[in-house]
Image: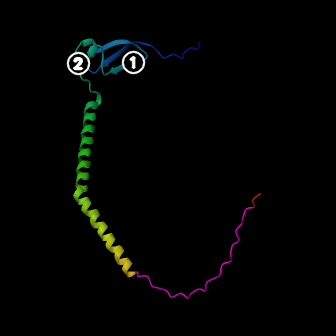
Amino acid sequence: MKSDIHPRYNSKTKVKCACGATFVLGSTKEDYSVDICSQCHPFYTGKQKLIDTAGRVDKFRERQKIAEQRQTEMKQHHQSKSETLEEKITRKAKANTEAKVAVKEEKTKKAPEKKVVAAKKPVAKKPVAKKTAKKK
């Protein structure tokens, strides 16, 4: 085995919990700080406790509140822009009548001019011989 490749073992490592409890154990690190320990964990104490590290619950609630505000803003925006069914029908009917009037005006403006074309001489067609099948 190689020598001097393993980390140094400290038999008196201090561990500090967020609840204020401290205790000593063996580890390769010198000091630890933990969020929860056996003195404050609900499993060992029998008490339920909400642990909010770095305000995670508050951050989540804030994001939810912002999302709800955005949704209400979007609904209000769509409601102000959306037209009622009656308004939509009248707008489409008006557009259709205007389009029909425009088409009629174009037709009357573009009255077809009759061109005088010289009469063509009729061309005689050659008679086509019918093929008859021979019976045996």
Q: Secondary structure at mark 2?
A: loop
Query: Is 131 left or right of 22, judged from the image as shown?
Result: right
- Packing grade of label 2 (10 A; few <14, some 14-19, many >=20) is few
- Packing grade of label 1 (10 A; few <14, some 14-19, many >=20) is some
Name the quadrant containing residue 15.
top left
- Determine contact: label 1, label 2, CB under 8 Å: no
Q: Residue at x 23, y 52 (%)?
A: 79
Color theme of the render: rainbow
- The residue to which callout 2 is attached is 48
In the picture as drawn, the residue positioned furthest to the front comes out as 136
**What is the distance, in whole Å, between disc 1 and disc 2 at their CAs?**
31 Å
**Percent position (x, y) of residue 10?**
42, 13
**Percent position (x, y) of residue 93?**
27, 64
The quarter of the image holding the C terminus is: bottom right
Q: Residue at x 26, y 63 (%)?
A: 91
The quarter of the image holding the N terminus is: top right
Q: Please give the range of residues in magenta.
A: 110-133
Tally of numbered discs: 2
Query: Is 121 left or right of 60, judged from the image as shown?
Result: right
Task: Judge by depth and name the residue closer to the eye, 124 or 95.
Answer: 124
Q: Residue at x 69, y 72 (%)?
A: 128
**Percent position (x, y) of residue 27?**
41, 14
- The residue to which callout 1 is attached is 30
Q: Secondary structure at mark 1?
A: loop
Of callouts 1 and 2, which one flags the residue occurring earlier in the amino acid sequence?
Answer: 1
Amino acid carrying label 1: it is Glu
Q: Main secondary structure of the magenta part?
A: loop
**Percent position (x, y) of residue 117?**
53, 87
Q: Residue at x 24, y 12 (%)?
A: 45
